[in-house]
Image: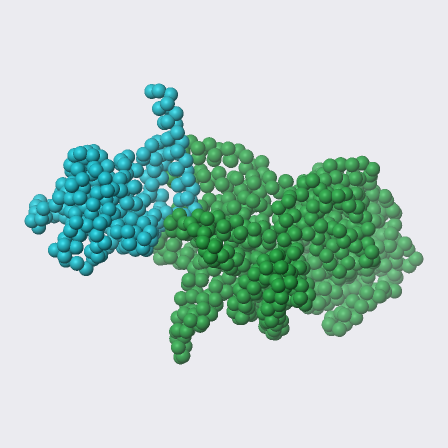
Chain colours: A green, B cyan
Amino acid sequence: MTRPLVLLTLSYVAGIILGRCFSPYIFILPAAAALLWALWNIFNQKNVVQVFIPLLLVFLVAGGLVYNYSLHKVRGNIRDYSGENCLLVGMVEDEPLWREDDVVFTLRSEKVRFREEEYSVNGRVRVTLQWKEKAEIPLDLSYGQKVSLRGKIYEPKGLRNPGGFDYQSFLETRGIAAAFYGPAAGVTFLGISKELSRLQLAAFKVRNRMSAVLRAYLPQREGNLLVGMLFGERSALDRETGQLFSQSGISHLLAVSGLHVGLVAGAIFLLGRRTGLQGWCTYLFVALLLFAYVYLCGLKPAAIRAFIMVLLAMGAVHLDRPGDFPTALAAAVLITLVYNPLLLFSVSFQLSYAATTAILFLTPLLQEKIAAILARLPFSFTLSPVKMISSLLAVTLAAQLGVIPLTAYYFRQVSLVALIANIFVLPVMALVLGLGLVSALLGLVWPLSGSLLNLANYPLLSYILFIARMFSALPFSYREVYPPRLTEIMLYYLFLALLAGGWRVLLSAYYRCKFRVRPFYFLVFLLLIALFVTWWGLPGIGSSTLEIVFLDVGQGDAIFIHTPQGQNILLDSGGKPAYMGNIDETGRLVVVPFLEYRRVKKLDMVIISHPHEDHYGGLFAVLDKIPVKRLVTTVELPETQSYGELLELAREKNIPREIVRRGDIFVAGPSLEIRVLSPPSELFNGTNSDSNNNSLVLHLRYKEISFLFTGDIETRAVDNLLKGEKILPVQILKVPHHGGYLSNLPQFLDSTAPRVAVITVGANSFGHPHPATLSALEDGGVEIYRTDFHGAVILKSNGYSWKIKTMLPFSSSLLINEMNKSGFILTCRETCSC
Amino acid sequence: MTINTITKNYKTQFKGVLSVTVRALLDLLYPPRCPFCNRLLTPYDAGKINFMVAGSNVSGLERLLCRRCAEELSWIESSCPYCAFPLEEGKYHRCNGRKFSFQECCALGCYRGGIQETLHRFKYHGRKSLAEPLGKLLYKKIALEPWISLVEFIVPIPLSRQRLLQRGYNQASLLARVLGRELGLPVMEILERVKDTESQTGLNKSQRKENLRGAFRCRQEVPEGGHVLLVDDVFTSGATAHEASRALKEAGAGRVSVAVLAR
């Protein structure tokens, strides 16, 4: 209660998190009630505490409301037009980022022309324009221009798979609602937009001029690095350099941070003193110029934080009030999150505040410890540079301790050399910044002299690059880790907080209150917690749940089976047809992250139902990252080239390959067996697609629940199944061939009588799933799950019943509507090969 | 009540609410600390919120010092009415046989421990803002004196020009301003130092007296027979207050009372 602003901010943040979890409507009534309560207490002259508690509630509710409001505003209505070719009109809202064969920029959408009709829309769009020839490059693109583009609007993908990347949320934190792809040749310029802001235009112009001055005589890499460091413009930097920096743990140099703003503020302050300003004039002078710098850098969260904290610190001096760091930090959080509450979920925001908070609370502690260690060394360590190094060490260590769980969670890697690399780099970085800033300012009036002065930065920049390269080349420089779970992250921070002095606070609170715990009960309590944590931490032990995850890999199959005995089986691995781009992509972006998220150390079995890219493409990445014990495939057929490559890779890795057919049985445990129902020993020949029909059909039985995985079989194979031995009623059916047309599906459903059907399907040109399939399933009263609507479908069973969770919330009534719509719109084709 | 006074009332009320709001916001951004022990103040150290009261005592959110310091500091509870020397129960003080030119003196506490440290920070470390809580505390103390209703204006003890330039502010006049606001009395900085005296610290009683003789002069006439409240930070031997009040009396003051932070 001694720092009211900290509590208010925490409650606002909690409100935002609640707002993300629950519907916004539940906030309105409590909002009104809390506000009334607060006002009532104020006007009845209640004491501070009585006013403060309802005020906390007001902030909590405000967090939820503001979050939902700004989410609604960011989303606009542009996504309603996604998926089809259209003409998009809008204003370019930032400086385009030019790359090898495309350009990326943000567009504030105004109008969409779509099927000969024009609609007014709102919402920002991230536009990517690609070109094939140099002549097509729209070189005139710049801020403030109104353009018309030809292409397709896409709804960005949300969190569709466990452990996946939430692209939608990523864009939304940047205020972007949708993505747009189109050819560069389709750009038409419509002149300067009326809505452009002169200030922003000026900022871009100044920044461009400064960047040009800084880049002038430097090699491209060093130039980009300098601009990246000075303005936090990370995107211009090539991927390789970025990777070097993150591996050696110094990538924070490339984000405008407290260090940058602090240095600039110091420089401006000295300048103000030199010109003879006094009192509040200095304050205003520094505030204005510093804001100009922060604005120039694009109002990044870390820069805003540093700006607010500098202002408050200077205000403390001027008002002659004692400054308070935690309060200043809380004020920065509050202001940033009122400006844009979505930022709470952005990586840069979280990293910045985690680092600052850790530095704030841990540095004094660490410095003490480090000084004590240094004092114990045999030779004298009272020299000032050594002292400086020890404080540098303390700050860096504190920051690292603060961000480790976050980097592990988001980037899945932890840098081990960050501590030492930073000590080598940070002092030089201050020099580079100072020199860069002076030469950039000089360059505004006299470009040549600025660029020449800037040449002095060249050795410093090469030194930084050298350090980055050297440290990232060390064998132990970084480790790839499994992403920590949310509970683990929270436990870590709790531990850190206790270490940083929280225990003292708790202890004093305990002494102050009258409640006393007897040691015996305390021990029992500790034991219970320990038991609970072990139980929680080791979910595999003692559990008897079968878990099956139907991953959303777009058009394709990838099914992960975790048996009660702890075995991991991957049935198909998704993938994109070779003609649609990189065959490896699905594996790299979906399957491997999922397996890492589940902490799968090895796969006991990988089954490929049939050799089509959308079933095996992802396996390249999986084989690269995760050891596999057995590879199970269907009978050899004329192979595609990449399938051959895959088998070759498996052979190189010494993975035994088994070919199975009807009648083979794998037993994965006492109560769990997997039988192969198809293909028969005599393969199908001369059907529509022999590879599809020869897919492995697997029947998995766990106690009293049966699953049927049907691969991509078509009518002939289904006929064969129906003719063969009677299939026991199954409870869960993976619908054959992504829901494609099957003439004998009703008979198949009659004989198998499934209760749940899962269709693994994505955007495709084959008309999957076929309306006839959907209606047959609906007629049979089967519960339908589709990976294109539900995201990944997670099914858990204890052998007698099952529970289904989907990654995306999707109500069933909406589902049927969508199905009808898609049934009408999509053209149907009876057969296809893939 | 005329319309004029009503609008005036509203104006003062508005001003009061505004200043309370601004102060509350500043308290939010810079949580107040106890001037004595530098710990953050808790709301339990606070008074009641009083937004509706306008005028002189709008400072509803005032939080002066933490409970612990309030209990532990060496406050002077009973003291000699003439020289504010702290007395034990039932004892009588003769001011060591000295005669002062002022009538009475009131001090907040003894010059040691927390108060001494705070005064050091206030005087020598540039913490001007300490005038606010200290002045308010002093106000609370002198408000209990029987003669307080008779006081007509407040005069701070001046600093020599050289010292003023050095320090940038006169701590006594800052205190006097706070007192003036709290009491609703005018502050008149009419005293000035004629002699650039040496620092009083390190001198004994008689040297102090000698050092200060004729050090003050009144710049203008005091209203005939007026009751003056003389404000200073520390009262050691009483020499300064004695000289200053003599100067005031020469300029026409009828009665001089002294208020100091520490004795």
Kindly identify the residue that appears in the image at 91 percent across and 59 percent down.
A685
Kindly tell me whether residue A542 is visible in this rendering. no
Where does the N terminus of chain B fall, quadrant-wise?
top left
State the count of labels.
0
The quadrant in which residue A677 appears is bottom right
Residue at the spot 46% in from the left edge and 66% down from the top edge: A394
Tell me if residue A682 comes above or below residue A83 in the rendering.
below
Q: Nearer the viewer, residue A490 or A709?
A: A490
Which residue is found at the position 59% from the left and 47% from the top? A342
Q: Does residue A227 sit above or below A204 in this rendering?
A: below
Q: Which one is in front, A16 or A136?
A: A136
Question: In the image, is B35 to the left or to the right of A798?
Answer: left
Is residue B239 visible to the viewer in this orientation of the structure? yes
Instruction: Locate residue A386, reporting x and y percent.
Output: 44, 72
Q: Residue furthest right?
A: A686
Image quadrant of residue A613?
A: bottom right
Q: Residue A87 appears at what percent x and percent y?
A: 79, 43
Picture quarter containing residue A111? Answer: top right
Q: Residue furthest top?
A: B2
Residue at coordinates 67% horizontally, 43% vertically from top-left? A196
Residue extending farthest to the bottom is: A378
Q: Is residue B161 above or below residue A222?
A: above
Q: Position of residue B231 (x, y in %)?
A: 23, 44
Q: Nearer the viewer, residue B205 or B262?
A: B205
Position of residue A455 relative to residue A197, above or below, is below
Task: Give x and y (percent) for residue A54.
Answer: 44, 38
Foreground pick, A40 / A702:
A40
